[in-house]
Amino acid sequence: MLDIAWGDIFLAALRVLIVGALFGAGLPALFAIGLRLQSAGAGEGAEKDAVGARRPALTAAAYVLFAIVVAAVVIGVLFITRHSLHHYFGIVLFGG
């Protein structure tokens, strides 16, 4: 008879769900927040055609969020292609 570890299957599915939610919704949310911060940092208000004072701290925070999103995408692509990079170029990433 098959000995199925339902607890392990459930935990693995839960991990996939959490990581999928984090990257599937989290990164676009960070990008959207970065756009909002950049807009507010440029002095754009909620009112149409309203211009306020520039806030460099908000613009810097937006760039930090953009950098996090770009880094996550680059790391993800490198992780997916790590075997090809090792095979074709001899580059070892993420511990081989």
Image (tube, rainbow, N blue to C red):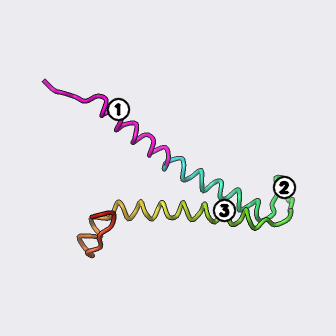
Q: Residue at x 76, y 59 (%)?
A: 40
- Whether residue 16 is in magenta: the answer is yes
Is 6 left, or right, of 68 in this rendering?
Answer: left
Q: Residue at x 68, y 66 (%)?
A: 60
Q: Residue at x 59, y 50 (%)?
A: 29
Considering only order in the chain, which callout, 1 or 2, is on the residue closer to the N terminus?
A: 1
Q: Amino acid under label 3?
A: Ala
Q: Amino acid under label 2?
A: Lys
Q: Quarter-wise, where is residue 45 in the image?
A: bottom right
Q: Secondary structure at mark 2?
A: loop
How crowded pointer 2 is (Cα within 10 Å; few <14, some 14-19, many 20+) is rated as few
- Label 2, on which residue? 48
**How far apart in space, not on screen, are marks 2 and 3 (Cα)?**
21 Å
- Whether residue 89 is in magenta: the answer is no
Q: Secondary structure at mark 1?
A: helix
Stretch in magenta? 1-22
**How far apart in space, not on screen, are marks 1 and 3 (Cα)?**
37 Å
- Label 3, on which residue? 62
